[in-house]
């Protein structure tokens, strides 16, 4: 393969593969945020918007810093395409399973704790 691709093309191929992997990681992180929202519902849409803005700022800065030295600070379309493809691959492969079953598991764990908290509140309220 050494004679097949030039050094610069190999470097860009590696950058593309890293961007696809990072897209999958970013999809996983966002699904974790979605799980938190499902387990602990937000009463105001404002908090969801704030969380999303923080997420996108973090992702943008992380991706930029990750690829800064390899691209001399330039924005490459294939990096953005790789990030999007990676997030899409994650979403259709593991994303739905992760989101569904981890949400169920956490709700199953938290349900008895919520009941316990309401019982303790009621008993504390009656004693006072």
Image (tube, rainbow, N blue to C red):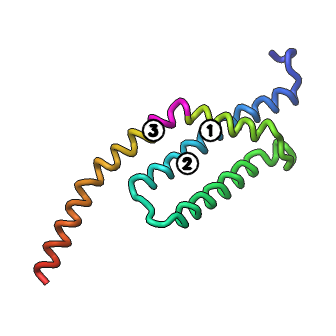
Left-right relation of 102 to 33: left
Which percent across, then down, holds residue 49? 58, 62
Residues in magenta? Answer: 92-97
Q: Going 85% across and 15% down the picture, which residue do you hit?
A: 4
Quarter of image, res 83: top right
Give neighbour class at mark 2: few <14, some 14-19, many 20+ (Cα, 10 Å).
Answer: some
Residue depicted at 65% across the width and 56% down the height: 58
State the residue position of label 2: 30
Q: Is residue 63 above or below residue 115?
A: above
Front in this rendered view, residue 44 or 112: 44
Tell me where residue 93 appears, x and y as whole percent.
Answer: 53, 30
Q: Secondary structure at mark 3?
A: helix
**How far apart in space, not on screen, are marks 3 and 2 (Cα)?**
11 Å
How many numbered marks have been drawn onto this rendered protein structure?
A: 3
Vertically, is 65 above or below 5? below
Tag on residue 87? 1
Q: Which mark is residue 98?
A: 3
Q: Nearer the viewer, residue 9 or 107?
A: 107
């Amino acid at each position: 393969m050494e004679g097949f691709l030039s050094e610069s093309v190999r470097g860009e191929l590696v950058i593309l593969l890293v961007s696809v992997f990072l897209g999958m990681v970013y999809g996983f992180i966002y699904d974790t945020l979605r799980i938190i929202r499902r387990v602990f519902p937000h009463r105001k849409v404002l908090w969801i918007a704030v969380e999303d803005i923080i997420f996108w700022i973090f992702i943008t800065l992380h991706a930029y810093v990750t690829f800064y030295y390899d691209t001399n600070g330039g924005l490459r379309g294939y990096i953005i395409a790789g990030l999007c493809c990676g997030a899409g691959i994650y979403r259709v492969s593991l994303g739905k399973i992760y989101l569904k079953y981890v949400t169920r598991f956490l709700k199953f764990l938290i349900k008895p704790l919520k009941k316990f908290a309401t019982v303790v509140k009621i008993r504390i309220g009656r004693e006072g």
